[in-house]
Amino acid sequence: MPRVCTICSHERRDAIEDAFIGGTAKRRIASQFGVTERTVRHHVREHLPALMALARDAERMARADTLLDRLEALQSRTEAILEELEGTDLYFARLGAIREMRRNLDLIGEVTKELDRTPTLSLRFSPEWLELRTVIAGPSSPTQRRGEPF
């Protein structure tokens, strides 16, 4: 059974990690917290990178939430403007508000990952694919005789 990391199980783990991140030398951290320099090195090498990656992910999510909040607030303001314009003859202004609403919804969809604009490529009717398919399958394939794609 593998040993538990001394630093991970230390009652002052957060203070040890904060000291390292703050630039305190490993030797000084070891003496200050009653552990060996080797255990500090091991923890920093094996466990701190994963923790820092989690922190980066959390920070990115927080920024995305802030962006989403701002976009949703902008969408609410755009909707309010469109409502004010509904009873008027300002058709260009109404169309402009509708355009902005669509742009806002596009951005919200991208931020929330509800809208995926990743391009897709279909080779099914590509002339190059049809030629290659003929070479691979030969002219005697039943699908080719019927004139249907693979």
Image (spheres, grey):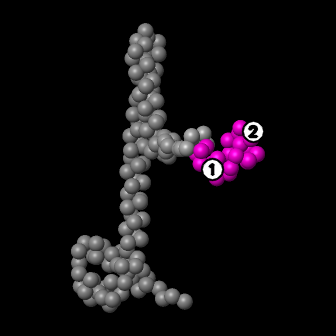
Q: Give me the disc on residue 101.
A: none
First in sequence: mark 1 vs mark 2: 1
Q: In the shown orientation, is residue 41 left or right of residue 143?
A: left
SS for tag 1?
helix
Q: In x, y percent, where is residue 19?
A: 27, 76
Relative to 104, residue 84 above or below: above
Quadrant for the C terminus, please. Answer: top right
Element class at badge 2: loop
Label placed on residue 146: 2
Q: Is residue 36 visible to the viewer in this orientation of the structure?
A: yes
Badge 2: how crowded within 10 Å, few (<14), some, or many (20+)?
Answer: few
Counting other residues with Cα less than 10 Å from the Cα at mark 1, is it few (<14), some (14-19), or many (20 or more)?
Answer: few
The image quadrant of residue 77 is: top left
Q: Is residue 15 visible?
A: no
Q: Residue at x 47, y 85 (%)?
A: 4
Q: Residue at x 38, y 57 (%)?
A: 59
Q: Which mark is residue 135?
A: 1
Q: Judge depth for marks 1 and 2 and give the one in front.
A: 1
Q: Which residues are magenta?
A: 129-150
* Amino acid of disc 2: Arg
Q: Nearer the viewer, residue 145 or 96?
A: 145
How far apart are labels 1 and 2 at the CA level? 17 Å
